[in-house]
Amino acid sequence: MDTFKLSSLLVRGFRNSNAAAVIPEHASRRLLSSISPKIPPPKPSPRESAQSSTSTSTLSLEPRHYALIGLCTLFLGGTAYYNVYYYRNEHGKDTYQPLDRENFRRHKLIKIFPLTHDTSILRFGSSIPETHAGKNSGPLFGGATHMIVKDDTCEIARQYSPVQYFRNGFDLMVKRYDDGSVSRYLHKKAVGDMVEMRGPIVTFPYEPNMVENLGLIAGGTGIAPFIQVIKGVLFNPHDSTKLHLIYANKTEGDILLREELDNLSQEYPDRLKIHYTLDYPPDEIGSGAWKGGKGFISDNMIKKWMPPKSDKTLILVCGPQSMIRHVAGMKEDEDRQGRLGGLLKAAGYTEQQVWKF
């Protein structure tokens, strides 16, 4: 009988006899080991040796190894985070470009609000300082401002005055002209597209209480810079300037931002007076008939709705060139006002009392 069989019989014998209650199992195992021949363990295969070596080396890492692994993990994690942040920033998903007066930046179109058949408000995402956004910010960026929009298909740029700045962007009101390269370019844009712009650039510098009365004569989309001025003045508790607006359009449906303007005049009845005039007023009769002005801006409208001539009065004019020429004479160029003419000169206002956009 070989040693293995003898060992098995001994174990079973000890377990089945009364001695099993006296001799513990671990003692029987020591006995068997003493009488069993010393058989060397089998040699591991090369693969098992490699696995054993790897396991041993992993368990026996020194502190400097753990430090190196930590640094590598930190580096790889930082690189991954930067790549994700850069991608989102570049594609405008979570981060908007800041405004820049000097350099063109790509701003993402995030919403479109149709106003009329040919005019829409385009909302662009941008990172704007909180002091320049919101109701109580006063005149934004030191006065009425504009953005320079570039048509990257033909390298033509045009000025547009935002009608609103807010925490994450601004709104441009754009009318489409058949012969307008930039306006057609903007109206072809879809939500998610990028447009190159720079600004805001101050068109008209304004300071609270710089005058007692501010007259505003607007035509069509010329209301855009005036809505900046109106809200900037009315929302500033330290500004007591009174506002007088004549707003000219072709038809009643062409009056832009009318609801907002009417709400402001109702909220500040002693500080904002508005007179609408239409080239083609509706032919309604009765209580719902048109109660505003009819026809082009006239000398009688100037006398009735504009503030009196005074060193404490300033009249601003913005609209189509034909309207500006009719009301105040042509502007010489973008930087020079040119001589005063038109209805305002005939009414006795001076060049120091009129500003043409």
Image (cartoon, rainbow, N blue to C red):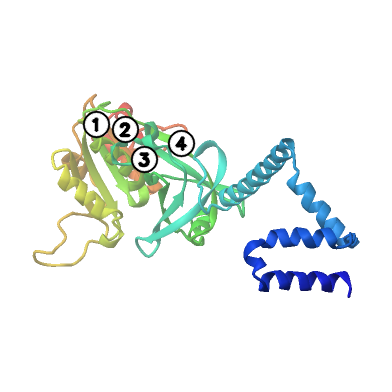
From this view, report whether residue 110 is shown above or below residue 148.
Answer: below
Label pair 2/3, CB-CB below 8 angstroms: no
Q: Classify mark 1: helix, strand or loop.
A: loop
Q: Amino acid at mark 1?
A: Gly
Q: Quadrant of residue 340?
A: top left
Please name which of the two marks, 4 or 3, marks the residue nearer to the observer. 3
Q: Which residue is denoted by mark 2 in the rendering?
A: 354
Q: Which residue is mark 1?
A: 348
Q: Amino acid type of disc 3?
A: Ala
Q: Secondary structure at mark 2?
A: strand
Q: On the image, numbered disc 3 is attached to which residue?
A: 133
Q: Amino acid at mark 4?
A: Ile
- CB within 8 Å, label 2 to label 1: no
Q: Secondary structure at mark 4?
A: strand
Between label 2 and label 1, give the one nearer the viewer: 2
Q: Is residue 110 visible?
A: yes
